[in-house]
Image: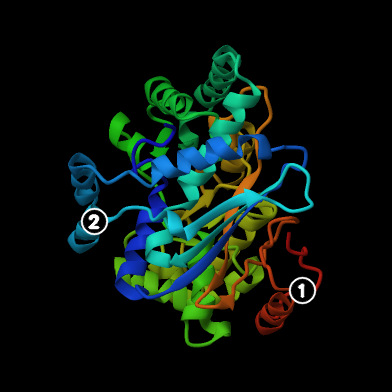
Amino acid sequence: MIVRSLLDTDLYKFTMMQVVLHHFPGAQVEYQFRCRTDDADLRPYLDEIRAELANLCTLRFQEEELAYLRSLRFMKSDFVDFLALFQFNHKYIDIRPKPGVGGQIDIAINGPWLHTILYEIPVLAIISEVYFRRKYPEADLAEGRRRLMEKIALVRAVDPELEFKISDFGTRRRFSMPWHEEVISTLKREVPQDFAGTSNVLLAMRTGVLPLGTMAHEYMQACQALGPRLRDSQVFAFDKWAQEYRGDLGIALSDTYGFNAFLRDFDMYFCKLFDGARHDSGDPFDWGERLVAHYQKNRVDPRGKTLIFSDQLSVPLAIEIARRFHGRARTSFGIGTNLTNDMGLGSLNIVIKMTECNGQPVAKVSDAPGKTVSKDAGYLAYLRQVYGLDRTTPAPH
């Protein structure tokens, strides 16, 4: 059994789920899976993946897990009480071979947002671990350990004045759960001053490190259907977040509609209210320069704000970014696959994205090729028109 605890997921799933419970309990959603690694054949593993999903649907939160969630300052008691009753329902997820596409599988998740939001992370982790243990049954962890120690050596060599901080954001595409835990334990032991924490709540609890996370694209996308009008959906999402957390968990996601649209909506009020923003697509140096300038334009000192970078990072790139913005803004770096699945074997680029909310298409318009998400070309064109987006924005996958 790969996933043995419902806490084995990313923190932002719980922070978003709490907003859903309190503000959108009746929302209905659709998610779709995509494997962007074209030569990965997942069909031979379909029965094993299905068996793992069946096991996932037997899990319940344990009392010690609920107590841990209750100890987090931003988790409210009624939400934790709801989680005590929570169990995955298999009727909301369907997995099958994809017709006419070699090696691909279809996964569709349909149902109440409140009861489907937790599916994404464990389903992706299951697919990744099944794939690697079946494709590389004799895989040796020695190469992974060697690569991890190389990263640690780079971190140790950073000037302490840089205040360099990295975090683990790698649950979804990890090599395996045991390796994931070893990575976190090793980072905590070897570079405790430079390791900020992990997005994985179970491993944060087990290892005594800080759980990290705020919001994901699905929250911003769903607000396209849940807000008063489409053009105001980004502002609506930030307002609802602030209403729920009252200034806590104050990192805004900046690339659901492209960075230009984010800056238009992220006015002086949000600049002052939120603690910072997260980069997840496009050139990180350009993004940081423009955000620093935006804070200054709005009479906010960027040195008091945090710029979080989380897009396909490696340790050398993170160090380079940290040096660029040292003394100009706080920085932190969420590293995913490069920490939890750098074994010399390649990795799977797999995602599960929201495509519909309350019967309406929703979309993400990315600053990076291949990361725009939409199942409806007409809706995507309308969204671009409403937000005044460049028509050359990369096409959806």
How many numbered marks does the figure carry? 2
Q: Quick one: which residue is furthest to the right in this view?
A: 392
Res 170 label: none
Percent across and percent down for residue 342 are 61, 27
Instruction: State the residue at coordinates (45%, 30%).
Output: 177
Quadrant the N terminus occupies: top left
Percent across and percent down for residue 114 are 37, 64
Q: Amino acid at mark 2?
A: Leu
Instruction: State the residue at coordinates (60%, 40%).
Output: 46
Please report contact status of discs 1 and 2: CB closer than 8 Å, yes or no: no
Note whether 31 is above or below 163 in the view shown. below
Res 390 label: 1
Q: Is residue 285 left or right of residue 198?
A: right
Which quarter of the picture shows residue 347?
top right
Q: Amino acid at mark 1?
A: Asp
Q: Quick one: which residue is furthest to the bottom in this view?
A: 228
Percent across and percent down for residue 52 are 47, 38
Mark-to-mark CA distance, 1 and 2:
46 Å
Instruction: State the residue at coordinates (30%, 31%).
Output: 206
- Residue at label 2? 85
Answer whether residue 250 is visible to the viewer in this image. no
Percent across and percent down for residue 72 are 24, 50
